[in-house]
Amino acid sequence: MKWKKPLLSLKPYQPGRTIDEVKKQFGLEKIVKLASNENPFGCSPKAAAAIRDYSPLLSLYPDGYATKLREAVSEHLKVRPEQLIFGDGSDELIQIISRALLHSGTNTVMASGTFSQYKHNAVIEGSEIREIPLMNGAHDLPSMLNAIDEKTSVVWLCSPNNPTGVYIKREDIYAFLSKVPKDVLIVLDEAYYEYVHAEDYYDALSLVEEYQNLIVLRTFSKVYGLASLRVGYGIANEDIIKVLDPARPPFNVNALAQAAAIEAIQDQAFVDECRAANQEGLKQFYQFCEDQQLKYFPSQGNFVLIDFECDGNEVFQFLMERGYIIRSGVPLGFPTFVRVTVGSTEQNEGVISKMKEFL
Ligand code: PMP
């Protein structure tokens, strides 16, 4: 086969063990999964109700323009409908952007210690990858700027950053954006935006107004609790959306996802409750870390990266055997850390008590 060469360097997706397998192996009755930054409170009951009686419509293709969802998001964000692009999760938007802009002969700049899909897609497209190490969990924007040259097509920013939870400060992002050449697309991935509570956070939508080479990515998978339905969106100026759109498969957001997301974005009371509960949950983990003198990154997301100063895989294994699935920091580039998703108060207490046992 005449495969794209870089594809051969990538491994097939490795599914984690299922909850049932873990239960069986360790003789556990209950498993709490705090590994994928999902919402422990599920989704808005209104979103769930929207798809309950959907089965008679399953034989029809979805609206390929996501017209009603577009209207709902446009209204909520106060942006024009033409400024939006929807994806089968924001994962697909990362893929679409890569497909549209990256190829051999280009390079792309990103942090090392950030969300894996930027690099994954760039490898497939044959673009040269320039990874700039994080500094104290944050993007090193001056060094990222230095890495940009005339062959740079895309710069990836993730704020709050997965897996550190650290965000980019308002003044830093303005300084950065003003210096990036206008023909370089900046992707600002804000998957965890709704959890942000820092006061000096920037307003991404004003940035989109000001900078014509910026696209902001958000998702319904996190605070909206619809990860399984797969729906994310990008916000940019209309010229960017017009060029990206043909790289999007025609029916990429399924009808159930559209129906649920319309209800979800209109239920901001649910979002507010989840954000408040997440902030309380974060405090539980911070208290634990402070009591045990463990280093951690203060997080603006729904997860915390904690340094156990030992092999993160060991912590992962210990907790899994006791019914808690979290993420080892090893594959995330933080070998002595683990990343824990903030769960309900009770789930947090549970995993913290097992972490204490480990110590
Ligand atoms: N960006 C970041 C930073 C993420 O953490 C994730 C999910 N883990 C995604 C994008 C992809 O989210 P989805 O495809 O579910 O919208």
Image (cartoon, helix red, strand yellow):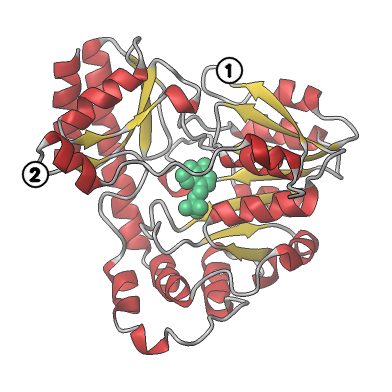
Question: Residue, x 25% and y 53% (percent of image)?
Answer: 41
Q: Is residue 191 visible?
A: no
Give left or right: position of 39 versus 79: left
Number of numbered discs: 2
- In this view, the residue in front, 188 or 171, is 188
Report the front residue among 58 and 235. 58
**Regarding mark 1 in the picture, which secondary structure is present there?**
loop
- Which corner quadrant of the image does residue 291 belong to? top left
Q: On the rendered structure, is 251 left or right of 20?
A: right
Image quadrant of residue 37? Answer: top left
Q: Which mark is residue 29?
A: 2
Residue for point 62% across, 77% down:
65
Q: Horizontal and vertical percent for residue 259?
A: 43, 76
Badge 1 amino acid: Met
Residue 6 coordinates in the image, percent (x, y) = 71, 38
Q: Residue at x 15, y 25 (%)?
A: 354
Q: Would residue 7 be seen by someone viewing this image from the given angle? A: yes
Depth check, mark 1 against mark 2: the one in front is 2
In the rendered view, does 341 fall on the left or right side of 93? left
Q: Residue 247: image x %, image y %? A: 73, 63
* Label 1 or label 2, whichever comes before in sequence order: 2
The reply to whether dot 1 and dot 2 touch (C-beta < 8 Å) is no
Q: Gap between marks 1 and 2, in whole Å?
A: 41 Å
User: To which residue does mark 1 refer?
Assistant: 135
In the rendered view, would you say 133 is above or below 53?
Answer: above
